[in-house]
Amino acid sequence: MRRSVILITGANGEIGHGLVNHFGRTSDHAILALDLKPLDDSLKCSGVDSIVGDILDDDLIQRIVSEYEINAIYHLAALLSTRAEYTPDIAHRVNVEGTLNLLKLAHEQSRWQEREVKFLFPSSIAVYGLPDRATKDRAGRLREEEWNLPTTMYGCNKLYCEQLGRYYALHHRQLAADRTPGGIDFRAVRFPGLISAETMPAGGTSDFAAEMVHAAARGEPYDCFVDEDARLPFLVMPDAIKAMTTIAAAPKENLTQSVYNVGAFSLSAGEIRDRVLGAFPDARVSFAPDRPRNCIVNSWPADIDDSRARREWNWSPDYDVDKAFGEYLAPGVRNGLRNP
Ligand code: NAD
Ligand code: SER
C-alpha cells in the first residue's frame, strides 16, 4: 500500500514552515515535505515524512510516485525575485520546469486514483509590471487581469506557471482519443509581500519589510534597500496560510477563475519604519536605496484588488495593519528572540 499524503514542495521555506505547522495541528492527512534543505527539527513530527531532494530530479519524482499516493500538492519550491534576477537560467529551470514536473506528477496521480488532485500554487504580485512610479500611483489597486507585464524573470515564471496550471486543469491532452477531462484542480493565489514573525526571508525583493522588523527586534541597525516612498501590499504569514488553505477548501463551483489576488494592507517603507519605531522605539532604520531593486518594487502595484477572492471563496484576512504589528509581528519576533 502506498502512503496517502499531501505533498508540500519547498517545505523548509517561510510558507512551508507555516503550512507544515498548520497541517500538523489541523489535519488527519500525513504530509510529505520535500525541500533541497533538510526539514527543520521543529517541523519533524509524526505524520510528517521528509525528503531532501530537488524538484528537477526525475528519479526522485518517480520514487515519490512509487511510494506515495498524493491527495493534494502545495507547490512552494521556487527561487524568489532577487535571487532569480541574479541567476535567471536556474530560476527558469526551478520555477518553470520544476512546476511542470509537479503538474505532470499531479496528472499521473489523478489517473492512478481516478479523481482530481488539487494543485495549490503561490503566485505573486511580481506578475504585474508597471512602467514607472507615476503610473503605479495612478493605477492604484490592480485587478488580476491588469498590467500583466512582468519586468523580472521571477514574475515571468509565475505568470507563465499560472497559465500552465490552467492549461493542465482544462485543456491538457485535448486532442487525445482517450482524453478524460480534468485530472488537476489548479488553484493559485497571488500573494503580496509576506512578513513572518517566525522566519527570515531570503532572496526576495519585498524582504525589506521583514528585515526591518527582525533587525529592530535584535537591536541591529537596518539600511533599507528601497526609498521611503516605495509602497507595496503586504500580508502576514498566518493570513498567507489562511489564504492557501481556504482556497483549497472552497467548493469548485464557486470559483470562476484559477488565479486570485489576496491582500490585507498597503504600506510604504517609511510607514513600515514608523510602525517598527512604534513597537521598538530604539530601532535604527536608515534608507540606502539600491536603484535596480527599487525599480522592481516600483514596477509592482501599490495595492491589489482582491474583491473576487472575497466574493467567491470568502477571503478575508484576520490581520489588518494595526493587528499585524500589534498582535502578531512585534510580540512574535520578541518571543522568537527569547525562544530561538
Ligand atoms: P522560501 O525561499 O523561504 O522557500 C522556498 C523553498 O524552496 C526553500 O526552502 C528552498 O530550499 C526550496 N527550494 C528551492 N529550490 C528547490 C528545488 N529545486 N527543489 C526543492 N526545493 C527547492 O520562499 P517562501 O517565502 O516560503 O515562498 C514559497 C512560495 O511562495 C514560492 O513559490 C514563492 O514564489 C511564493 N511567494 C512568496 C512570497 C513571499 O513574500 N515570501 C510572495 C509571493 C509568492
Ligand atoms: N515577495 C516575493 C519577492 O519579493 C514576491 O513573490 O520575491
Image: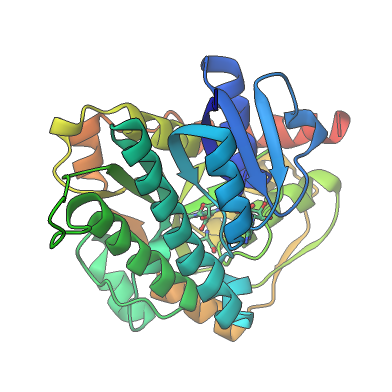
Residue 55, above or below 11: below
Q: Quadrant of residue 327?
A: top right
Above or below, comparing residue 48 to residue 325 in the picture: above
Residue in the image at 55% along x and 62% along y: 206
Residue 34: quarter of image? top right
Outermost residue to the front: 177
Q: Where is residue 304 in the image (x, y as percent from the top left)?
A: 31, 55
* Left or right: 66 as drawn, with respect to 115: right
Q: Nearer the viewer, residue 87 or 262?
A: 87
How is colour applied across the structure in the image?
rainbow
Q: Residue at x 17, y 38 (%)?
A: 255
Residue 340 location (% of width, % of height)? 86, 34
Residue at (16% x, 45% y) in the render? 181
**Residue 261 position within the rendered picture, expressed as x and y whole percent measured from the top left:** 31, 50
Task: Decide which of 51, 44 is in the foreground and name it.
Answer: 51
Q: Residue at x 79, y 44 (%)?
A: 217
In percent of width and height, residue 63 lies at: 61, 46
View quadrant of ligand 1: bottom right
Residue 7 in view here: yes
